[in-house]
Every structure is written in C-alpha cells, then in structure tokens.
Amino acid sequence: MSVSPADDGLWCRRFHPAPDAAHRLVCFPHAGGSASYYLPVSTALAPRVDVVAVQYPGRQDRRNEPLTDDIATLADQVHEALRGWDDRPLTFFGHSMGALVAFEVARRFEREGSGPVRLYASGRRAPSRYRDENVHRRTDDGIIAEVKAMSGTDDRLLGDDELIRMILPALRGDYRAVETYRCAPGATVACPITALVGDSDPKTSVDEAQDWAKHTSADFDLRILPGGHFYLNSRAADVLKVLDDHFAAQAAPQGT
C-alpha cells in the first residue's frame, strides 16, 4: 500500500504535474547536475507521463544545504523522499552518477517489496566496473577542466567566476561520491535494465555499459548512440523515443 509522499517538493520536482498519468518517470541527475536538467523530458512526456526529477542537496535552491558525498547515503535519502510516489508504476532514468543513485534506490525499494518496472542507466559503466579516478582531489581548475572536457556544462557558465564558485562544491562532492562508490558484491535488481551509452564516451566503454546485464535478474538491453559522455544533449530525440516506446509498451494490453 502506498502512503502520502514524504517529500513536499524539496527533493522531488514536478515541472508539469500529471495527476492522471498512468506512469511515473523518476529522473536522477549527473554529477554537478540538478533537477532542471530534465525539464525538456518533462515537457516532452507530460501529461502522458508524470515526470519527477530529483534535486540533490548542495545546488541551485538547495545550495546552502550540506552536500551528500556518499552514494549509499544519498540513495537512502532519495528513497525516503520517494516514499508514497509509487502509487503508479515507476520507471527510473539516471545519467552518469544518477545511474548509480537510481540503481541503489531501486535496490532499496525492492527490499520493501516494490520498485521500478525498468531502470535506464545512461552514460555510466556497470556498478561492478571500477576505474581508479581522483577528480575530486584535483584543484578547482582541474575539476573545471574535467567538466569542460565532458561537455556537460554550458561554457558560458564556466566563464562566470561567481557561478563557478557556486557549483564547485557540488561538483567536488558528487565526484567524491562516484569515485569512492563500491558496489556490493553480486548486487542486482529484479527489474529489467536498459543501458544507454555514447559510442565515444571516455568515461564508459561499450563493454563497461554491457556489464549492467550482470546487475539484473530480468531482461537487459543495450542502446549505443552517437556521441560522448553527454550524448543525450544532442540525441535527445533518440532518448525520448526510447522512453516513448517503453511507456507505450507499458500501456498496451497484455498479449498485444
């Protein structure tokens, strides 16, 4: 039985509330990212799908709150915030760091007997695939250089010193969370997983994305799209088509 949502808009942002939608998509941002990154997704899918974007602490209107620089702790917090939002089928979509958070939140839901109908893991190697990375230990300039190389932030923002100072703590904390994350041995979810990856992503190879198959006891699907780590910025229509097809299949009568 679902309960009233535990979050009143602090963690869960609905840009286009769709109370009559049959399905809900929960979107998890990348390192340094915010809920507003998924505004175009909400615009495209509403009102057919109720889109909820997660807002992590330490950024935008939550920038004065303490950062959470540990994936497990962040997943605990998001799971608690999402209580009561499972009054309709949930689908999770996470990009980069968000894929790890989505995976861990799905595990927590499943321990309680619920969980998403599918997890979309975008731009992130499988939880069991480890690289020795230390971006979070770099200087401020080093972190900015990393973000520019990934093309995940508007260069106009990176040229604004005041804005850089505002986002750097969140970036450093998020990189620390990702780079210190260690997946529990044999950790899986019961829902199907679709992994999406850019064919020239320096952070995730196709082989590393393929290994998400080891983290589900259900079906697995791999989608390879042109582009780098933020392939979805230029291939938004392709990603939306994947989601559209998923929700259409969910809505179709059984056996059709």
Image (tube, rainbow, N blue to C red):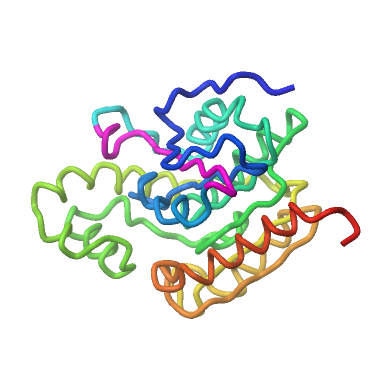
Question: Where is residue 148, by image quadrant?
Answer: bottom left
Horizontal side, residue 254 vs residue 153: left or right: right
Give the residue at x 87% y 62%.
Answer: 256
Magenta segment range? Answer: 47-63
Measuring from the top left, give residue 194's x and y in whole percent: 66, 61
Farthest residue to the left: give it: 161
Horizontal side, residue 202 vs residue 93: left or right: left
Give the residue at x 67% y 42%.
Answer: 22
* Residue 45 to residue 10: above or below: below
Q: Nearer the viewer, residue 176 or 32?
A: 32
Farthest residue to the right: give it: 255
Question: Where is residue 173, by image quadrant?
Answer: top left
Q: How many marks?
A: 0
Give the residue at x 68% y 36%.
Answer: 88
* Residue 90 to residue 245: above or below: above
Measuring from the top left, give residue 156's x and y in whole percent: 15, 62
Measuring from the top left, give residue 114's x and y in whole percent: 74, 34
Horizontal side, residue 1 vs residue 119: left or right: right
Q: Nearer the viewer, residue 97 or 136?
A: 97
Residue 249 falls within the magenta-colored stretch: no
Horizontal side, residue 15 vs residue 64: left or right: right
Measuring from the top left, give residue 32's x and y in whole percent: 33, 49
